[in-house]
């Protein structure tokens, strides 16, 4: 499997279709590489995955409201966002920063280093905590997790804005990630407020 970056086909994924995994060409990693090649722009696919997971969290919350209406809209949506949104965020960040470090760093406009692995591992911890909080705890004790996530994502978002304005870093991975960096924490805080 290779990622073709020549000529006008920049960003087009070339896979070895002889190795399929759940119908996806290119084996297990073909799915992630395909996602990262959306629109032929480095980094757009990664950002789109966060936004799709965000929308999916609302849809799952709606389904939970149909199944357990007595728990209320805010609690059902909070649980869905903890499991689908925060859980997926943690897993996806972990895979990206730990296994595709160079590619993720390049899309952000950074140079890959050991700190990326640390970001990946802490993201995995946040994601596992989100799944636990949503499935096992029912979202009731998630305030400490949300506080950590708010500081982590808002801090990252502020840093991305600073880099865009002061350093002129307008790479797709640095600019487009600003939306989920603020949208996810604001949603969780609003749902927590409605639940309490």
Image (cartoon, grey):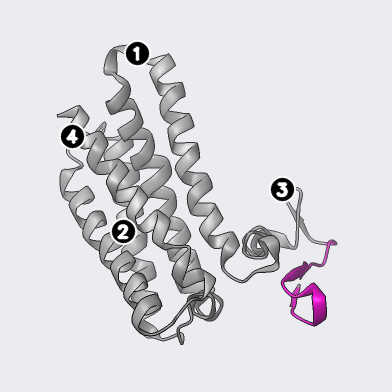
- Asked if the residues shown at circle 4 and circle 3 are in contact, with their CB atoms under 8 angstroms apart, the answer is no
Q: Between disc 2 and disc 3, whose residue precedes?
A: 3
Residue underneath mark 4:
193
Q: CA distance from mark 2 to mark 1?
A: 31 Å
Q: Between disc 1 and disc 4, whose residue precedes?
A: 1
Residue underneath mark 1:
69
**Discs 1/4, front:** 4
Look at 80% across and 73% down and name the residue there: 9
Q: Could you say where residue 173 lies in the image, as x and y percent from the top left? A: 50, 70
Q: Secondary structure at mark 1?
A: helix
Residue underneath mark 2:
125
Q: Between disc 2 and disc 1, whose residue precedes?
A: 1
Q: Residues within 10 Å of mark 2 (few under 14, many from 20)?
A: some
**Discs 4/3, front:** 4
Q: Secondary structure at mark 3?
A: loop
Q: Between disc 1 and disc 3, whose residue precedes?
A: 3
Residue underneath mark 3:
22
- Asked if the residues shown at circle 2 and circle 1 are in contact, with their CB atoms under 8 angstroms apart, the answer is no
């Amino acid at each position: 499997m290779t990622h073709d970056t020549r000529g006008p086909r920049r960003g087009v994924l070339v896979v070895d279709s002889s190795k399929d995994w759940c119908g996806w060409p290119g084996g297990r990693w073909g799915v992630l590489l395909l996602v990262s090649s959306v629109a032929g722009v480095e980094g757009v696919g990664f950002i789109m995955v966060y936004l799709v997971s965000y929308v999916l969290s609302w849809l799952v919350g709606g389904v939970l409201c149909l199944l357990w209406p007595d728990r209320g809209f805010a609690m059902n949506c909070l649980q869905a966002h903890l499991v689908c949104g925060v859980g997926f965020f943690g897993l996806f960040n972990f895979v990206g920063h730990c296994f595709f470090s160079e590619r993720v760093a390049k899309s952000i406009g950074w140079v890959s280093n050991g700190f990326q692995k640390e970001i990946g591992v802490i993201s995995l911890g946040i994601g596992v905590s989100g799944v636990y909080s949503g499935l096992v705890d029912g979202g009731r004790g998630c305030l400490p997790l949300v506080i950590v996530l708010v500081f982590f994502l808002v801090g990252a978002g502020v840093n991305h804005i600073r880099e865009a304005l002061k350093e002129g870093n307008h790479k797709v991975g640095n600019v487009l990630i600003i939306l989920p960096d603020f949208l996810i924490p604001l949603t969780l805080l609003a749902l927590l407020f409605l639940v309490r």
